[in-house]
Image (cartoon, rainbow, N blue to C red):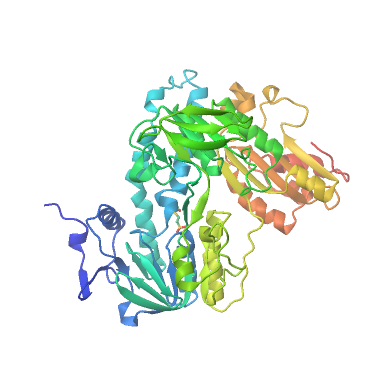
């Protein structure tokens, strides 16, 4: 019989009924971690994986319930500040849904979508082979992801243990008893402070009938248990980022995709500062790739016997129709499950169940903190991680506030779409006298201009100029400060992390013009700003 990772590890029985895998004195290689996580995922190992200094007892300064990005970064920060921390997760790895079902597969699929889009536009030209749609398989991509994802999981466990010296219990449910007590595997651990970090799940709108039918998926079930057939078409219910991102991927594989959304794409409540010109370019380009986007409609029911066969929708004009499909994907946003915390602790939550916190991540109950997706939008990595850090700083005695009202944002279609600061309209309303620098400039049709042109868009520039992307930045003419930047294209996302910081520091067009571009820089903002920076009176470009 093949030995499993579990066979090679010491299993300690503490007391009758308490069995766990004690890892504190063992250094596992990446390979061994991968094997162990695999064993836990397949049920070969069912006991908790524990990295706890038992000799120090079971009392902690802070327990993080949930070891995703917020819980892991909060734990690392708490540990570094000299607090004794414990982080607990039901999955056999730290890092949460990001590397398991969410951000990492989304990025893999979005990169695949971009590659397939590129291959399609260039099919059977130059050195490109003819694009073979039958080889573009959604199931193959899911299989590829699932085969590789434990590597990142293994690394999170290894880094947290060997480099960050974090204490953790994985593969075990945490039950919050009261604000000082958490039960795991029948054993009680005590804590001074408690941090809730258990994230969210897709919201399946109860008013839409038939969402329990086979053939209905969300981003999580697409991966686990996983889509097990190659769909012929897809109907997406909802117009969230998830809807746009996964929809663009499905469409790129050749699975014709229809998005049914109440609000217009990128005009949903959860997104702010979306410039109308950017939005138009993005949505037009999704349609150009063949997607059907039906806005202002109301999906009513997934029809079919036990399997989805279509979606009944009420259109904006009040008529109803069934859009046939064998694959329904839900992209209507996410909700938390906070009932156990309300019941055990009496913490305040909002109408959708998100935990109410102040800027120090403190809930309505003293000593209890909540972080990450559990507290609502934006459900982005920077926020989760910095929420964890904020909680840890406050628990360690520092009065530290985290304001995430302004942040750089992004999504994928077959493009990378990213934005920060004010839209043109918002800037006009707030400042009146502004300059807009954009590419293509107003008055030039994209079909007649191959710019913007840079990494990732060079071939388009010489084949289909209108596909090269769109960009815009906005200055306040009086202070000459950068107010906002907006981009659809390739390779500029990282720049927006720094632009966000620079905008908050008050960077001016003159300082922008002083920067050293690495030509052809995907956002073009430096050279375009420099062309205007010499003018005492700023103008559009
Ligand atoms: C591979 C990768 O960085 C994505 S998973 C991140 C999880 S965590 O570091 O805990 O935020």
Identify whether 73 is placed above or below 279. below
Corner quadrant of residue 13: bottom left
Identify whether 131 is placed above or below 238. above
Q: Would you say 492 lies left or right of 427 here?
A: left
Residue 540 pos. (x, y %) = 81, 38
Residue 76 visible in the shown view: no
39 and 217: which one is in front?
217
Residue 479 pos. (x, y %) = 83, 53
Number of disc labels: 0
Corner quadrant of residue 162: bottom left
143 and 210: which one is in front?
210
Q: Among all residues in the image, which is located at the extreme right? A: 537
Image quarter hosting the C terminus? top right
Residue 80 pos. (x, y %) = 48, 73
Q: Among all residues in the image, which is located at the extreme left? A: 1
Residue 56 visible in the shown view: yes
Residue 459 pos. (x, y %) = 57, 26
Q: Would you say 144 lies left or right of 76 here?
A: left
Identify whether 385 is placed above or below 243. below
Residue visible at 61% across and 38% down?
265
40 and 24: which one is in front?
40
Q: Quadrant of ligand 1?
A: bottom left
């Amino acid at each position: 019989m093949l030995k499993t990772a579990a066979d090679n590890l010491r299993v300690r029985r503490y007391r009758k009924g308490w069995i766990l895998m004690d890892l504190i004195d063992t250094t596992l290689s990446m390979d061994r971690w991968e094997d162990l996580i695999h064993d836990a995922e397949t049920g070969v190992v069912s006991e908790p994986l524990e990295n706890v200094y038992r000799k120090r007892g079971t009392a902690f300064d802070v327990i993080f319930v949930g070891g995703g990005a917020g819980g892991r970064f909060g734990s690392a920060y708490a540990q570094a500040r000299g607090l004794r921390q414990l982080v607990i997760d039901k999955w056999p790895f730290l890092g949460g849904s990001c590397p398991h079902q969410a951000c990492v597969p989304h990025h893999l699929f979005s990169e695949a979508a971009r590659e397939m889009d590129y291959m399609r536009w260039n099919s059977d030209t130059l050195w490109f082979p003819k694009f073979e749609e039958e080889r573009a398989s959604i199931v193959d991509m899911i299989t590829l992801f699932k085969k590789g994802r434990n590597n990142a999981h293994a690394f999170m466990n290894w880094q947290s243990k060997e480099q960050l010296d974090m204490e953790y219990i994985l593969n075990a449910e945490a039950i919050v008893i009261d604000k000082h007590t958490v039960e795991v595997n029948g054993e009680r651990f005590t804590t001074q402070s408690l941090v809730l970090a258990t994230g969210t799940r897709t919201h399946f709108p109860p008013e839409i009938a038939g969402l329990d039918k086979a053939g209905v998926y969300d981003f999580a079930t697409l991966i686990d248990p996983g889509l097990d057939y190659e769909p012929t078409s897809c109907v997406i219910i909802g117009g969230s980022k998830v809807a746009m991102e996964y929809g663009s991927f499905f469409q790129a594989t050749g699975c014709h995709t229809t998005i049914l959304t109440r609000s217009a794409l990128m005009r949903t409540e959860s997104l702010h500062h979306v410039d109308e010109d950017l939005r138009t370019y993005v949505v037009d380009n999704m349609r150009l790739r063949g997607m059907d986007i039906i806005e202002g409609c109301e999906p009513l029911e997934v029809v079919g016997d036990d399997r989805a066969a279509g979606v009944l929708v009420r259109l904006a004009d009040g008529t109803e129709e069934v859009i046939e499909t064998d694959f329904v994907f839900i992209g209507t946003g996410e909700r938390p499950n906070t009932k156990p915390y309300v019941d055990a602790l009496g913490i305040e939550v909002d109408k959708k169940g998100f935990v109410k916190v102040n800027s120090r991540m403190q809930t309505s109950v003293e000593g209890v903190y909540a972080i990450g997706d559990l507290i609502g939008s934006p459900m982005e990595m920077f926020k989760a991680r910095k929420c964890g850090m904020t909680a840890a700083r406050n628990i360690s005695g520092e009065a530290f506030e985290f304001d995430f009202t302004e942040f750089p944002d992004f999504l994928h279609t077959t493009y990378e779409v990213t934005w920060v600061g004010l839209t043109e309209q918002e800037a006009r309303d707030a400042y009146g006298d502004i300059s807009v620098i954009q590419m293509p400039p107003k008055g030039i049709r994209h079909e007649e201009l191959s710019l913007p042109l840079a990494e990732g868009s060079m071939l388009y520039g010489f084949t289909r100029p209108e596909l090269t992307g769109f960009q815009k930045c906005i200055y306040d003419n009086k202070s000459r400060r950068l107010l906002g930047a907006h981009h659809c294209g390739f390779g500029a996302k990282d720049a927006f992390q720094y632009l966000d910081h620079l905008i908050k520091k008050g960077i001016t067009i003159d300082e922008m013009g002083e920067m050293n571009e690495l030509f052809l820089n995907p956002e073009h903002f430096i050279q375009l700003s420099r062309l205007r920076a010499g003018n005492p009176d700023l103008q559009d470009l």
